[in-house]
Amino acid sequence: MLNIKKKDKVIILSGKDKGKKGEVIYVSPDKDRVIVAKVNFVKRHTKPTQRESGGICEKEAPVNISKVMLICPKCDQASRPKFDRLSDGKKVRVCRRCGEMII
């Protein structure tokens, strides 16, 4: 089970964008990759189509999920969440630093 979901705030742990923070746009659990907004830009040369003009465009590329860490919305620090079960049996993510549930 992955501990990072769409719309989570994460920090990049290594690579050319180390230390940058961003929001997760897309998660690919089968490939263990995430796309983070405004991080890991690459240039793509595209041909013109009827909808778009061609040229060199920049877009976000996927990052390995092991290179990002979740930021707790309450304490605003990076931490690896733990999983707890509520009384009704539902699994929730909990911050290890402050003990708050991450929704």
Image (cartoon, rainbow, N blue to C red):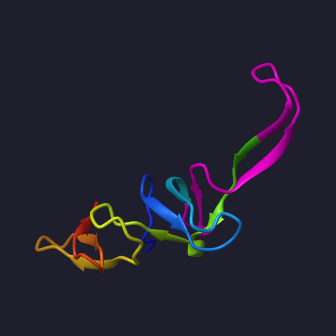
Q: What's the residue at 35%, 64% (across, down)? A: 76
Q: What's the residue at 18%, 73% (across, down)? A: 89
Q: Residue furthest left?
A: 87
Quadrant position of the C terminus in the picture: bottom left
The correct choice, above or below, for 7 with respect to 96 in the image is above
Q: Nearer the viewer, residue 86 or 70?
A: 70
The magenta segment: 28-57
Residue 66 appears left or right of 87: right
Residue 78 appears left or right of 15: left
Query: Residue 15: horizontal and vertical position, in percent?
Result: 69, 70
The correct choice, above or below, for 49 with respect to 20 in the image is above
Query: Residue 27: horizontal and vertical position, in percent?
Result: 54, 58
The correct choice, above or below, for 89 with respect to 34 in the image is below
Q: What's the residue at 38%, 70% (across, down)? A: 77
Residue 36 painted magenta? yes
Q: What's the residue at 77%, 51% (across, down)? A: 42
Query: Residue 11: horizontal and vertical position, in percent?
Result: 51, 65
Query: Residue 5: horizontal and vertical position, in percent?
Result: 43, 60
Quadrant position of the N terminus in the picture: bottom left
Residue 103 appears left or right of 43: left
